[in-house]
Image (tube, rainbow, N blue to C red):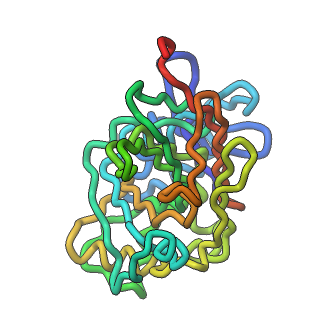
Amino acid sequence: MKLSTVRLGRNRTAAARVHKRHCVLLPYPDVGALIASGDGWWDRAGADIGERHRLDDVSYAPLMVRPGKMVAVGLNYAVRARELGCSVPAAPEFSVRNDVHVVVGADDDIRLPAEGQDVHCGVELGVVIGRRARDVTARSALSHVAGYTVVNVVTVRNGPERIPSAVVATVVGPALITTDDAPIGARGLTINCLVDGRVTQKANTSELIFDVATVIAHVSSSVTLLPGDLITTGTPAGTGTSRRYEVPPRPGTQVISVIKGVGEHRNIVMRPSSQ
């Protein structure tokens, strides 16, 4: 099943079940709210009721307009560790964000601050939790997953060392692919990021150091994961941490993030109009 959050007019969004040429609206403001609505969300998502709209008549809002929390996994690709000059971690390293304010949709513009020197994008496999998880094992972890999505975390770097100073935007969507329509653990999916047509990142989810089940089990040992929470599983090499790899988007640059079988973002980088 494929679920999205669509815009209907200026101030209205709705969760929707997406078909080839149309979508069926569901009585929730976004997919996160649908999943957080409690047991039976899957059946409610598949109900053959609700308004129908042609896909040509809607646009994609962020999958979760206000995520409950985001768990961001750090190094999770060996090539990325080599790019940074770091050793491979012995266990998943992660941080938790409960204040994810700047979330944008798959086709939205990315608004840059005036003061940022360099902007860097990192495509990641996103895992949306569908059932409460605390102290779960890797063996049972995947039963707590609702599905998978595409995430790109955009950061601004300042100064000669280009240290990340702020998250500019988190792009989430355009859809949630539920687990019944995805490979087990989302393994074997190609993942790419292109900046103005140039491939800056290319990897496969089978290259994750810690697979989805391992990540969920490890995180749940210290954090209670709730339905609608989002885990970002780490970005591949090529986000611009050295001059060799640096491809900082310029104002007006198009950034395309793709995970085959899951979805695609097409975002334009924008500076304030006064710049």
Rendered view: 46 above or below 232: above
Side of 190 where 218 appears, left or right: left
Tell which residue pokes out farthest to the left in this image. 222
Left or right? Give the position of 232 relative to 49. left
Q: Residue at x 71, y 55 (%)?
A: 199
Q: Residue at x 46, y 30 (%)?
A: 112
Q: Nearer the viewer, residue 124 or 251?
A: 251
Residue farthest to the right, as pictured: 21
Relative to residue 208, is residue 257 depicted above or below?
Answer: above
Q: Residue 18 location in percent, x, y?
A: 67, 44
Q: Which residue does the image show at 57% across and 32% down from the upper left?
A: 269
Where residue 34 sits in the image (x, y, percent)? 44, 46
Residue 81 visible? The answer is yes
248 or 262: nearer the eye?
Answer: 248
The residue lying furthest to the front in this view is: 160
Can residue 149 be spotted in the picture?
no
At x 45% / y 80%, what residue is drawn?
210
Say which of 242 and 21 sits in front. Answer: 242
Label tally: 0
Residue 242 position in % (x across, y down): 50, 59
Q: Position of residue 104 (x, y in %)?
A: 49, 36
Is the N terminus in the top left, top right, bottom left or bottom right quadrant?
Answer: bottom right
